[in-house]
Image (cartoon, grey):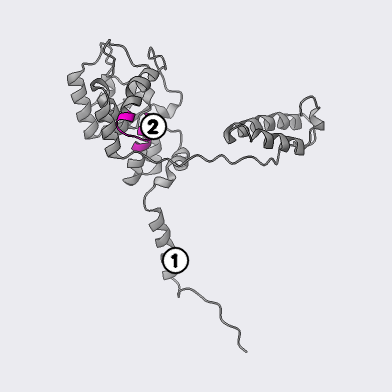
Amino acid sequence: IGGKRLSAVRASEIQAWVTDRAKVLSPTTVRLLAQTLRSVFNAAVQDRLIASSPVARLSLPRSEKARIVPLTVAQVQALADAMPDRCRAMIIIQDGLGLRIAELLALRLEDVDFLRRTVRVEWQLTQDGKHRVSPKAPRSRRTVPLPTVVAETLAAHISEFSPAEDGSLFTTTSGNLYRQEHFGARAFKPAAKSAGLPAGVTSHDLRHHYASVLLAAGESVVAVAERLGHENATLVLKTYGHLMPGSEDRTRRAIDTAWSTSDGPQTAQAPSR
């Protein structure tokens, strides 16, 4: 395709290029490349440099994410038990509040309201562990309910490991905030292996577990999205829709209810002779 004028590029050439790239690149990458091409040719159409876009009807590789299989409570507890003493509470707290790892590491004592049983999520920690910054998305700044199990875990952690002068709840033995990479490599990964968790498990799986528990309890998709700090419920549906309980039973009831209001299934009558 390279070297040709836009008007000379044919749809079949672009399709051949996409098919070739799909052999060596992931479906997601191929789709991103196709999206860039679409933008270029759509701009050319708007500027009347070409009459139509040859990228309008591409056949793209399917991009399917593996369905999330959330951890169990027993697995989360085993993970917490395998963590270093100073980090053990962090597992229960992240899991019980549904926090991103950057949000967890940024928590301060003043963010926790034991009386009202809430936790304010207003900051996240930079990758290097040196600065608190505002979350990128407005909805990420939120107040989440503080369950009893998390409150008790927090109280025990604070009693054993005093917060830093600025109120930081989680610090290293030298008093510094954790770098995400350090926490993952030095604490989380070895503990996950020791606890016998599936390969590839990360701290983000604790958010998945949090969402799955809420959905299993009948919490609304909108509420779960708010707790997780998502902009809308669409992502929750796409990611966790298969975990929503009772969908099969609801399907059965819906069909049975519909038929119960009629005279029953109608079968075709054999033609008379």
Reply yes or no: does residue 166 show up in magenta: no
Res. 22 image quadrant: top right
Alpha-carbon neighbours of circle 2 within 10 Å: few (<14), some, or many (≥20)? some
Q: Nearer the viewer, mark 2 or mark 1?
A: 2
Residue 106 visible in the shown view: no
The span shown in magenta is 192-210
Q: Earlier in the sequence, mark 2 or mark 1?
A: 2
Return the residue at label 1: 258
Residue 124 image offset from top left, x and y in percent: 38, 21
Residue 204's tag is none
Residue 169 image offset from top left, x and y in percent: 27, 19
Callout 1 amino acid: Ala
Determine whether 251 is above or below 191 in the image.
below
Callout 2 amino acid: Val
Return the residue at label 2: 201
**Residue in the picture at 41% in, 56% down:** 248
Q: Secondary structure at mark 1?
A: helix
In this image, 204 relative to 44: left or right? left
Res. 132 image quadrant: top left
